[in-house]
Image (cartoon, rainbow, N blue to C red):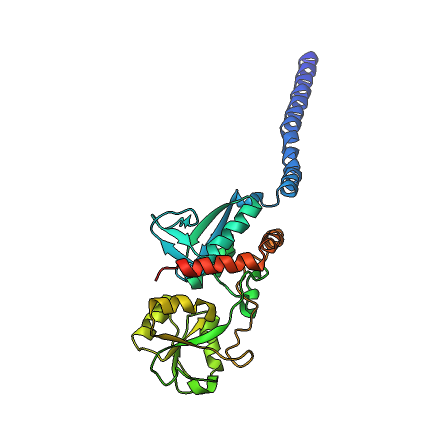
Amino acid sequence: MNTTRRITVILLALLMTLSLAACGGSAAPAAAPAAAPAAQTETAEADPLAYLNGQLRVGMECAYAPSNWQESEPSDTNVPVENVSGAYAEGYDVQIARIIADQLGLELVVVKMEWDGLIEALNQGQIDAIIAGMADTETRKEAINFSEPYHSTIYALMVNAGTVYENATSLADFSGASVLGQKDTALDWTIDQIPGVNHLPAVGSVPDMIARLQQGACDAIVINLENFPGYQAANPNFVAVSFPEGEGLDPGFRGSCVGLRKSDDVLLSLVNDALATVDQAQRDELWDTALNNQPI
C-alpha cells in the first residue's frame, strides 16, 4: 500500500509539473503583440501618410464654377467623381488638388458632397481633405485646420442691369435692397454689413443664387468678384458692383484654403509644402483656364 501511494504521489507531481509547463508554454506567445506598436511606429516614421492607403480623398461640391464643377465626359485634366457614376470633376480646385496629390505621391479621389456636410465628413473620416473654395473663417478654424491660402478673393454684389442698384457707389446705396447669399458661407453672413438691408434667407448653392437673381426674386447677390466674367458670359444682363478697398464687404478671412483634420499635422505641413511649389503666375494661369472653360 505504501508503495502504491508513493507511486501515486509521484505521478501526481509529474502531472502538475507538466500542467505548469503547458501553461507556461501557452502564455509565452502572449508577449509577442508588444512588438506591434514598435513596428507601426517604424512604418509611420518611414511613411507618415501610410494611413491614407495611397489615396487623397477630397470633398467638394462640384457645383461652384470656376472653382469646381461637374462634367459628363473624361478629359486630360478632369477627375472621376467617386460617388456619381459617369461624372467628372473639373475646375481650379481640382487642379490644385491634383498638384497636391502628385506632390504627396497619392491617387486623387474626388467625392461630391453638399457644402454644409463637408466639415462633418472630414472629421468622420469619409474624406481626407476639403478643397472646395472654403475660406479659413474663425468659426471653421474651431473645427478643422487650414492650409495656407491657395486663392484670394474680393467680394462684390451682382445685380441686373437697369436697376437702381447698378450705379451704386457705396454699401449704403443698397439700404432696403433684398440681397441673397449662399448658406453657411461668407457670401451670406457678410450681407449684414449693408446698412438697412433686407437679408433674404440663404440658399444652398451659387447656381441657385444666380437663378433667383435672373428671375428677379432678389435685388442683388454676393459674389466673388473674380468669378464675375463667367457669370456675365452666361448672362450679359448681369452687372458687378464693387467698392474701393476697405469700403466693401469684408469676409474676414485670408482666402480659399485646404481644410484638414486637427489631428493631421504632418499632412498639413506636406500640403503647405506642395502649395509652396505653385507660384502666383501658375495660380493665375490655372484660374484663367478654369474661368475660360467653366460651363455657361
Q: Can residue 127 be seen in this view?
A: no
Quadrant housing residue 12 = top right
Query: 245 above or below 62?
Result: below
Quadrant the C terminus occupies: bottom left
| Relative image position of residue 83 (x, y in whole percent) | 38, 50
Query: 82 above or below 191?
Result: above
Residue in view at x 39 percent, y 82 percent: 166
Quadrant the N terminus occupies: top right
Query: 100 above or below 215?
Result: above
| Relative image position of residue 186 (x, y in whole percent) | 48, 72
How many numbered marks appear?
A: 0
Which is nearer the eye, 191 or 34? 191
Which is nearer the eye, 23 or 68? 68
Relative placement, left or right, of 63 versus 272 is left
Which is nearer the eye, 186 or 67? 67
Q: Can residue 279 be seen in this view?
A: yes
